[in-house]
Image: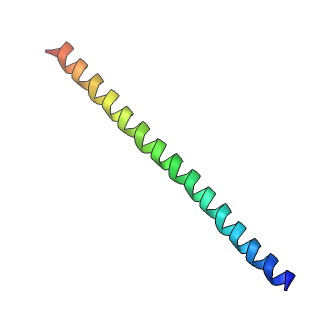
Amino acid sequence: MLECWLVVVEQQWRQWCWLVVAKQQWRQWCWLVVAEQQWRQWCCFMVAEHQWDTW
């Protein structure tokens, strides 16, 4: 009975651990998306500035 309970706890712990890892990956992905948007905004700004200088 105790062994069965330990297996259930272990499975729940693994599931929780996987969720934490997935959440961290999601946060990293979310951060990358935000960084990419900021980079695009900066790049667009630089291009616009360059066009302004050229004009």
Horizontal relation, residue 10 to residue 51: left or right: right
Question: For the view shown, which residue lies furthest in the right direction?
Answer: 2
Question: Percent from the top left, x then y, of residue 4?
Answer: 80, 83
Instruction: State the residue in front, 52 or 26.
Output: 26
For the point 36% across and 38% down, which residue is it?
Answer: 37
Question: Percent from the top left, x then y, of residue 52?
Answer: 18, 16
* Quadrant of res 49: top left
For the point 48% across and 42% down, which residue is it?
Answer: 31
Question: For the view shown, which residue lies furthest in the left direction?
Answer: 55
Location of the C terminus by quadrant is top left
Question: Percent from the top left, x then y, of residue 25?
Answer: 55, 53
Location of the N terminus by quadrant is bottom right
Location of residue 18 with respect to 23 vertically, above or below? below
Horizontal relation, residue 37 to residue 5: left or right: left
Instruction: State the residue in front, 30 or 20.
Output: 20
Location of residue 52 with respect to 2 vertically, above or below? above
Horizontal relation, residue 29 to residue 50: left or right: right
Location of residue 53 with respect to 34 vertically, above or below? above
Question: For the view shown, which residue lies furthest in the front direction?
Answer: 1
Question: Percent from the top left, x then y, of residue 50?
Answer: 24, 19
For the point 34% across and 27% down, which residue is it?
Answer: 42
Question: For the view shown, which residue lies furthest in the bottom direction?
Answer: 1
* Colouring style: rainbow
The mark tally for this picture is 0
For the point 63% across and 63% down, which residue is it?
Answer: 18
